[in-house]
């Protein structure tokens, strides 16, 4: 987790003109995804989350200030093009770093890591509950859709979306009520608002050195680029 954070900060600190350094960052992360045996579909489906931000950034070349250049008959701002590249490159590489972390680390280990990094236990408890019950809510939604389809409902037309909206509302109420029951059950067993800290062994120094080698090397390259400017 510390290595991923350091790597993301190095990516953010990379000057936008250092194209070769962005290529090295990308090569390192692609190598990590291949080593982790992630499929292309696994990575692309998780990169979809950045699409709205990239679509918003597409307006920068059109309305950006400064000198302009013609691309297919459209005048685009050079400064806006650099800003678009900067946002797209750093967002994609940062998200790919988080995908590598989440895809190679169990949720329980992530929560234990947050505990060791002194993150407030209330936050780790919320994250733990969210992860545990996302599958429960998704399963109930799938069963609800199956029941509606077995009764002839298809949300293909705008007029048929009303029953689906009612079903989603009912699912929200059921999820809230389930949360209340779970909380009462936990409170009856001594829950006082925070989960107990995970018991983990501290990582040896050799593990720290091996894990931080690549992010520290990235920071060395970034520092060298800034000093050479």
Image (spheres, rainbow, N blue to C red):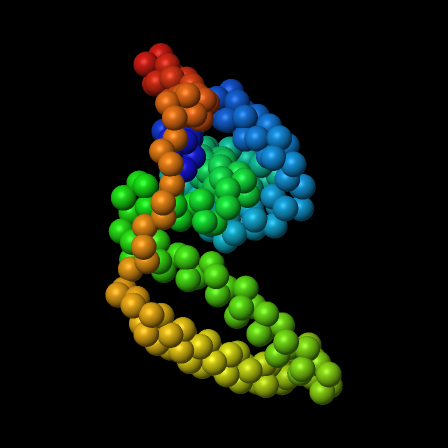
Vertical side of 192 occupied by 58: above or below: above
Viewer-closest of 193 and 6: 193
Number of numbered discs on residues: 0
x and y, in percent, of residue 141 in the image: 58, 74
Q: Name the residue at 46% across, 38% down.
A: 94
Q: Kindly tell me whether residue 76 is visible in this rendering.
A: no
Q: Kindly tell me whether residue 156 is visible in this rendering.
A: yes
Vertical side of 133 occupied by 105: above or below: above
Q: Name the residue at 52% across, 22% down.
A: 24
Vertical side of 21 occupied by 174: above or below: below
x and y, in percent, of residue 84 in the image: 47, 39
Q: Taking 70 as reference, is 80 left or right?
A: left
Image-quadrant location for residue 182: bottom left
Q: Taking 76 as reference, is 38 left or right?
A: right
Viewer-closest of 122 and 14: 122
Image-quadrant location for residue 74: top right
Q: Quadrant of the C terminus?
A: top left
Q: Which residue appears farthest toward the front when viewing the image?
A: 189
Q: Name the residue at 26% across, 65% down.
A: 192
Image-quadrant location for residue 156: bottom right
x and y, in percent, of residue 162 in the image: 57, 85
Q: Taking 144 as reference, is 122 left or right?
A: left
Q: Quadrant of the N terminus?
A: top left
Q: Name the residue at 27% across, 44% down.
A: 118
Viewer-closest of 73 and 146: 146
Q: Taking 36 as reference, is 99 left or right?
A: left
């Amino acid at each position: 987790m510390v290595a991923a954070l350091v790597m993301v900060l190095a990516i953010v600190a990379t000057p936008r003109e250092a194209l070769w350094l962005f290529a090295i960052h990308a090569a390192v992360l692609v190598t990590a995804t291949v080593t982790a045996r992630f499929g292309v579909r696994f990575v692309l489906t998780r990169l979809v989350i950045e699409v709205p931000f990239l679509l918003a950034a597409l307006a920068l070349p059109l309305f950006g200030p400064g000198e302009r250049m013609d691309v297919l008959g459209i005048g685009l701002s050079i400064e806006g093009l650099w800003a678009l590249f900067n946002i797209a490159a750093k967002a994609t590489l940062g998200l790919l770093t988080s995908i590598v972390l989440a895809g190679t680390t169990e949720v329980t280990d992530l929560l234990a890591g947050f505990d060791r990094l002194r993150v407030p236990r209330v936050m780790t408890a919320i994250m733990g509950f969210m992860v545990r019950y996302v599958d429960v809510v998704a399963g109930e939604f799938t069963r609800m859709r199956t029941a509606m389809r077995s009764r002839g409902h298809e949300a293909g037309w705008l007029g048929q979306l009303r029953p689906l909206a009612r079903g989603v509302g009912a699912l929200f109420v059921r999820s809230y009520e389930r949360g209340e029951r779970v909380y009462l059950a936990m409170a009856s067993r001594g829950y006082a608002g925070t989960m107990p800290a995970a018991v983990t062994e501290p990582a040896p120094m050799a593990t720290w050195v091996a894990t931080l080698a690549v992010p520290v090397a990235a920071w060395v390259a970034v520092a060298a680029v800034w000093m050479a400017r």
